Amino acid sequence: MGKKGFTTEDTESTEEEGEEKSKKALPPLPSVSSVSSVVDSPYVVNLNDVTGQIVDAAMKVHTALGPGLLESAYETCLAYELRRRGLKVVAQLGLPVVYDGVRLDAGYRIDLLVDDRVIVELKAVEFLLPIHRAQLLSYLKLSGCKVGLLINFNVLRLKDGIKRIVN
């Protein structure tokens, strides 16, 4: 996890530690895209293959569960399905903000980071709003990832709830 430059350990601290850390300038975070492109799964080679596997897994989850559940249920099932397919998945990954050279925990959490390359932001809402796209785009910029998927499970046909966003 340390390879990506941000971990949950980096973002958790006590109030005293937070004050002490905020006084010291930390080096900027290395981007996630600087991580080696070697993938643990022998079946997934490029970014399009990774996003294709994510979409396929999401379709399987949606077919099994249908719309109407909480986002957390879809997140748990999608993470399970992606791991079954041999993909590396990190759920609820803390994403700090670097401001004025200081790494600050602003409470941002990436729903799923897949193979250290693709951010998956999940929703279970009536319809996607521009702010949802903006949220994913901000996560892409902060993390250095190039591609993200915005998936709304609260639709009759999942293909209507998937947006691919490139930074």
Image (spheres, rainbow, N blue to C red):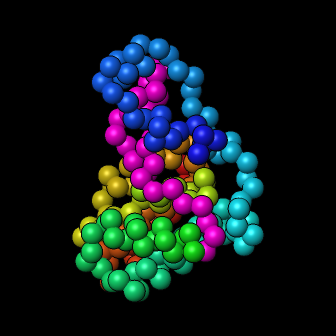
Span of residues in magenta: 85-110
Farthest residue in the top direction? 23
Q: Residue at x 56, y 26 (%)?
A: 28
The x, y position of residue 103, in whole percent, is 46, 27
The x, y position of residue 84, in whole percent, is 57, 74
- Specify whether residue 131 is painted magenta: no
Check the image and report above or below for 97 versus 57.
above
Image quarter for residue 162? bottom left
Residue 141 shown left or right of residue 160 in the figure: right
- Specify whether residue 100 is painted magenta: yes
Farthest residue in the bottom direction? 64
From the viewer's side, name the closer residue of 122 and 158.
Answer: 122
Q: Quadrant of the N terminus?
A: top right
The answer to whether residue 18 is seen in the rendering is: yes
Figure disc tally: 0
Q: Residue at x 48, y 67 (%)?
A: 79
Q: Residue at x 65, y 45 (%)?
A: 33
Check the image and report above or below for 61 versus 120.
below
The answer to whether residue 134 is seen in the rendering is: no
